[in-house]
Amino acid sequence: MKPIIDLSGKVGLITGIANEKSISTGVAEACVEAGARLVVTYQNEKTRAFIEPVVHRLGLEHVCLMDVTRPETMDETFATIDRAFGKLDFAIHSMAFAKRDDLHGRVVDTSADGFALAMDVSTHSFVRMAKCAEPLMEKAGGGALITMTYLGSEKVIPHYGVMGLCKAALEAATRYMACELGQKNIRVNAVSPGPLMTRAASGIARFDDLMASAVERSPMHSLVTPEDIGALTAFLVSDAGRLVTGGVHFVDAGYNIIG
């Protein structure tokens, strides 16, 4: 009998690996363990140095430059996937960015250019990724698109600012794309982890307080780990999750249900 999470023969794209502690690292580990072949991306040569330990440890052969503010790099990444595999079964979108002043300041003070940049990198890049993935997933007979979101999309989280707006739009995009792509057997979901310390989280003011609150107030009194996120994501992209689409799936020890 095959294991519930079996990704044997599947090809996946994973973005957002920054170092060993990244959410995407946990996702990559779970997918490799389940038998998937992966393509991973890096933003620039400086960031590539930080992901090399993960690449070597997991034995990943396909590593591509992809800076979503440079459309040609996304096009080349998907062209590389097509040349190497001729299909794509799943893609993980795990990236977000906002200027420091816009992230730490009031939403009403957000600059127009800062808002546009945050939405472009954090939200519309998922839409662009889906557009590029669609023909390769059709070749595979279907596929799964996953993005990473956060509770700040629906509740006011201190010091999360404009990123809360980006995540709300990201979750709306997830629902609309799930509806549009479902007829092609392409599923679209969002995973919403509880707070955990990553390089991205380090830019949020008083993030230690947020993690302490999660431990204290969540029903299971625990912090999520990259491995927990990886396990849920691997399930969603596997055949076991074949009829799960359009949802926001929490992995946060139940923190999201507490008022």
Image (tube, rainbow, N blue to C red):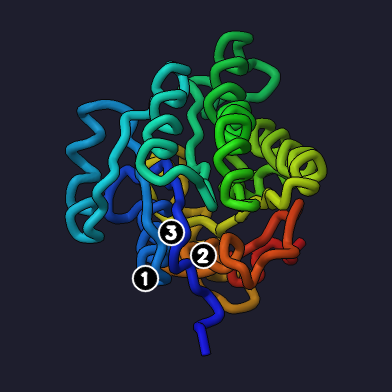
Amino acid type at mark 1: Glu
Asked if marks 2 and 1 touch (Cβ < 8 Å), the reply is: yes
Q: Is residue 231 left or right of residue 191?
A: left
- Left or right: 35 in relation to 95: left
Identify the residue at image location x=61%, y=15%. Answer: 116
Whole-percent x, y for residue 129 in the image: 56, 33
Q: Which residue is mark 3?
A: 27
Q: In terms of depth relative to the viewer, which is nearer, 98 or 180?
A: 180
Instruction: Work out whether residue 142 or residue 255 is closer to the camera in this orientation and state it.
Output: 142
The mark nearer the N terminus, 2 or 1, is 1
Name the residue tied to disc 1.
33
- The kind of residue on which mark 3 rests is Val
Task: Name the residue: 23% across, 51% down.
Answer: 55
Residue type of the residue flagged with mark 2: Ala
Query: In the rendered image of this protein, does residue 210 appear above or below residue 29?
Result: above
Q: Considering only vertical position in the picture, is 72 above or below 168? A: above
Q: Residues within 10 Å of mark 2 (few under 14, many from 20)?
A: many
Q: CA distance from mark 2 to mark 1?
A: 10 Å
- In the rendered image, residue 233, in percent from the top left (x then y), is placed at 54, 61
Image-quadrant location for residue 8: bottom left
State which tag comes first along the sequence, 2 or 3: 3
Instruction: Determine whether label 2 and label 3 are within 8 Å by CB.
Output: yes
Q: Is residue 259 left or right of residue 29?
A: right
* Residue 171 lies in quadrant: top right
Q: Residue furthest bottom?
A: 1
Q: Position of residue 118 (x, y in %)?
A: 56, 23
The mark found on residue 234 in the picture is: 2
Give me the residue at 65% from left, 52% from top.
142
Residue ID at (57%, 66%): 238
Q: Position of residue 48 (x, y in %)?
A: 23, 36
Local SS, label 2: helix
